[in-house]
Image (cartoon, grey):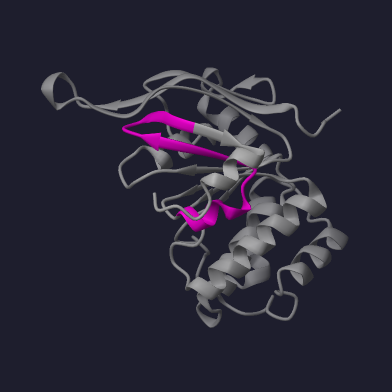
Amino acid sequence: MKTAGEVIIRAEKLSKYYGDGEALVKSVDQVDLSLRRGEITAIVGKSGSGKTTLLHMLGGLELPTAGRVILEGHSLYEMKDSARTRFRRARVGFIFQKFQLIPDMTVRQNLHFPLHVAGREPDPDYERELTAMLDLDDRLGFYPHQLSGGGQQRAAIARALLMKPDLILADEPTGNIDEAAGQELLQFIGRLNRQYGQTFVIVTHDGTVASTAHRIIRLKDGRIHSDTADGAAGEERGREV
């Protein structure tokens, strides 16, 4: 049984290094981290602090140099590549900064594509509820270029959520949309979290994005510099990072 507040994913001594000797770059260095189900966590820090690399390793997209990632009791990097890919598709939803919608597919086709690859059928009731909530129900026949930046981002969110993943990882979700669309998007994420108990991890360099978070993890030079939760996280909100 899945219970809110239990640990959903854990990183142990997670590291990603590039180069060697004097040219060694420690993008992520010995990170220990546990994230809880039903929470929104913001990972913040300046460009080059290791945020996106950490997110990709948590989601099984990038092999670590060292360390482990345990998702729902499964060690991601002890799996074979094909098994990890199948597991990731079933358990993790990704929202990318550049949306990564398929341009020659309609919004509906984009939403269904990950399900098709996984050999699954969409839940029509959940799809209707989700697309109505995200104001996409009258745009399902549109192509991505016919949507605004905010519309494309909402389509990317719907695509990630339609799989009903245990964990949603978002990389700079407001990075390519204007401030008004960004605020609207953050409100959607908060609403989805409250209504469905979805677990979000949001990577950002923008302190205002952290206003949706229950917990704020600040990275510096590939390491956790600070980790604040609940009331203490409020002191971090709105800061420049």
Where is 157 relative to 38, above or below?
below
Where is 203 relative to 225, above or below?
below
Residue 23 rendering spot, x and y as whole percentages? 14, 27
Residue 196 rendering spot, x and y as whole percentages? 80, 50
Where is 39 relative to 156, above or below?
above
Where is 90 relative to 192, above or below?
above
In the rendered structure, the answer to whether residue 22 lies left or right of residue 29 reads: left
Q: Along the line of sight, which residue is nearer the eye, 234 or 153?
A: 234
Residue 65 rendering spot, x and y as whole percentages? 36, 21
Q: Which residues are magenta?
A: 207-226
User: Where, by quadrant of the figure, is residue 165 drawn?
Assistant: top right
User: Where, by quadrant of the figure, is residue 175 drawn?
Assistant: bottom left
Q: Which residue is drawn at the image coordinates 41% and 40% (left, top)?
A: 51
Q: Is residue 219 magenta?
A: yes
Q: Which residue is drawn at the image coordinates 40% and 53% (left, top)?
A: 240
Count of marks, rendered view: 0
Could one spot residue 229 in this view of the protein?
yes
Residue 164 rendering spot, x and y as whole percentages? 75, 47
